Amino acid sequence: MDELADLLTQIRSCTQCAAHFAHPPRPIVQASAPAKLLIIGQAPGFRVQMSGRPFDDPSGVRLRAWLGLSPAQFYNPELVAIAPTGFCYPGRDSRGADLPPRPECAPLWRRKLLSHLRQIRLTVLLGSYAMREDSRANPAAKERAQAKQSPVWGYVQPDKIALPHPSWRNNALLKREPWIEAELLPLLRVQIQSILASEDPGAV
């Protein structure tokens, strides 16, 4: 077994946060060394916890449309790596909203996982938790955010883009910021198709 496969097995069998859950932990991750696109979201939702497949819910349908990817492309680990801020469904609060991602995942697994993903050409940060985690790991991104040199959504760096989470809860935000769907996403789709086509003309 190679090092990345061994690491993925360790991640998927992790029970570090079991005491914090009312359900069995089920870490969900997708990765392969040749992957060119990395998606960092917040944490799996309840439906994904049940199916074991990342973004196997309405948010995933919207995300794939945003990125211009078919399900076959999206779930191909040699094209797309999916590593949420927290690998397990965190449960819900008293109002029925998903709890924040558990903080244990990043120090335990993130650096190890990313060290094996050396072919990534674009990272998509979905939502505030992903952006916050990136700013902790990336001083340049943190400095830009503190200096307010970057918009809340849009390019953080040439190889990273920050998007709202594709949840229905962000419908009001998307209406307030129509440029995201009208201007930003079309450019993003072109960039993604260019990345995939440059590696495998049959991938698009």
Image (cartoon, rainbow, N blue to C red):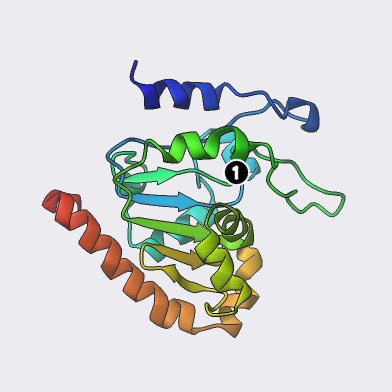
Give the residue furthest to the top: 1
On the picture, is 14 further left or further right than 103?
Answer: left
Give the residue furthest to the left: 201
Q: Looking at this view, is 57 or 147 the one in front?
A: 147
Q: For residue 145, which quarter of the picture?
A: bottom right
Q: Looking at this view, is 129 or 158 the one in front?
A: 158
Q: For residue 22, which quarter of the picture?
A: top right
Q: Looking at this view, is 15 or 165 the one in front?
A: 15
Q: For residue 109, which quarter of the picture?
A: top right
- Percent from the top left, x then y, of residue 163? 51, 67
Residue at screen point 51% across, 64% down: 140
Residue at screen point 54% across, 60% down: 139
What residue type is disc 1 on? Answer: Pro
On the picture, is 146 further left or further right than 75?
Answer: right
- Percent from the top left, x then y, of residue 126? 53, 59
In what quadrant of the picture does the C terminus appear? bottom left
Kind of element beneath mark 1? loop
Question: Label 1, on which residue?
Answer: 44
Figure check: 15 above or below 58:
above
In what quadrant of the picture does the N terminus appear? top left
Figure check: 192 above or below 6:
below
State how many labels appear. Answer: 1
On the picture, is 114 further left or further right than 143?
Answer: left
Residue at screen point 52% across, 65% down: 141
Q: Residues within 10 Å of mark 1 (few under 14, many from 20)?
A: many
- Percent from the top left, x then y, of residue 113? 46, 36
Residue at screen point 63% across, 73% down: 146
